[in-house]
Amino acid sequence: MRPEQVEVEAAAESDFAHAQALRRNVVAFKFGGTSLLGAKRMMHAAGLVRAAARASNVTVVVSAMKGVTDRLLSIARALSDGRLAYARNEAEGLIHLHGDVLQDLHLAPAEHDRVRCELHLLGRDLLHEVPQRGHVEHAAELSDRLASFGERFSARLFAAALESSGVAAVPVASSDFVLTCDTFRDAKPHLDETKSRGRAVLLPLLEDGLVPVVTGFIGATPDGRITTLGRNSSDFSGAIIAHVVDAEELVIWTDVDGIYTANPQEAAEARLLHDLSYDEAHALAASGAKVLHPHVLPLAAETEMTVWVRNTFRPDVRGTRIGLPQDANDRLQSGGVA
Ligand code: ADP
Ligand code: ASP
Ligand code: MG
């Protein structure tokens, strides 16, 4: 066989492999801040992705590690109050916190150095926002820029945790494609534009067999200024990104067994709910059940994606399923034949 013929055949083979890869179903996994708090938990969560990646293409959406967003927002407030030394100290503390997680991941030397370099660059950008002298005007725009660092740190660390678990992964900044209005701290995404831009970013990664690890919570205005979608909105980012990649399922991995009739950490009589319609879940979320951001449900209902709320620490528990009634779903899957 001539060399060029070998090349053509190899290219055809790899095209076939890509097509096969995308013919597999896509699932989106969103991990909350408690699930990612420290190297041990990140490695455990990575194991859940590795298991799912055997059967499906997986796209991951991450929150900041628990407590990090609060600390970043306290830096923003300290800057506006002129408490510059406190702000600087906190920023350095957060850089060390993430550096310690990297150490605890015990990556291979080359991988460790690469991720350390990425974290160093992020840390440098964070310190750039926290000057040691002068006056900083408190603006919602600065507060969003600062808040975005939590998810940006955790996406890099979680991609590294996946790599070290044998899952090829790449961190992705959602601000590269989640396009929003400029209402800082509560920005609304433009879904159509986000979908087309997001597909251009994410599908080639999935085709190459990589797991994208996308930052929750953040987007950007059309002129590139970082926004956030509101507190606790990484669940919403999970739904947006699931929609972008046409995932059939979104799994919200959190620290309780699913959605209960009331907050199980506060009410001993709270009962676990096994199956909910989109409307029922929306009513619970809108009445303050923090376990699921209310914006998830209208989008999930519109796209008929199934949403699961499951416990990262007890993956043997089924969790809560939100979707079309199971029998209607079965009919749809079998081409509408009842
Ligand atoms: P994550 O960081 O995973 O997004 P959150 O802290 O935002 O997690 O949400 C999970 C928490 O939501 C649970 O630990 C629980 O205390 C609280 N919660 C409030 N209401 C409910 C409810 N009805 N069902 C389950 N959890 C609830
Ligand atoms: N990290 C963000 C917050 O603490 C978003 C999220 O966790 O859902 O609000
Ligand atoms: Mg949450």
Image (cartoon, grey):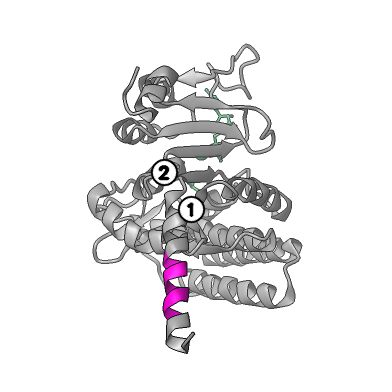
Residue 196, percent from left and from top: 27, 56
Residue 226 seen in the current view: no
Q: Which one is in front, 224 or 206? A: 206
Residue occupying the point 58% across, 50% down: 53
Whether the residue carrying mark 1 lies under 8 Å from ligand 2 is answered with no
Res 329 quadrant in image: top left
Residue 181, percent from left and from top: 24, 52
- Labels 2 and 1 touching (C-beta < 8 A): no
Residue 26, percent from left and from top: 45, 46
Bounds of the magenta segment: 7-15
> Could you tell whether 197 is left or right of 315 in the image?
left
The amino acid beneath tag 2 is: Ala
Q: Which residue is mark 2?
A: 247
- Could you tell me how far apart the alpha carbons at marks 2 and 1 are, in whole angstroms? 32 Å
Callout 2 secondary element: loop
What quarter of the picture does the C terminus occupy?
Answer: top left
Q: Which one is in front, 171 or 225? A: 171
The quarter of the picture showing ligand 1 = top right
The image's mark for residue 73 is: 1
Image height of 279 relative to 149, above or below = above
Overall secondary structure of the magenta stretch? helix
Residue that lies at the very extreme toward the top in this rendered image: 269
Residue occupying the point 52% across, 66% down: 84
> Could you tell whether 53 is left or right of 181 in the image?
right
Residue 171 seen in the current view: yes
The amino acid beneath tag 1 is: Leu
Crowd band around label 1 with a 10 angstrom C-alpha radius: few (<14), some (14–19), many (20+): some
Circle count: 2
Residue occupying the point 64% across, 73% down: 116
Residue occupying the point 62% across, 59% down: 167
Callout 1 secondary element: helix
233 is within the stretch colored magenta: no
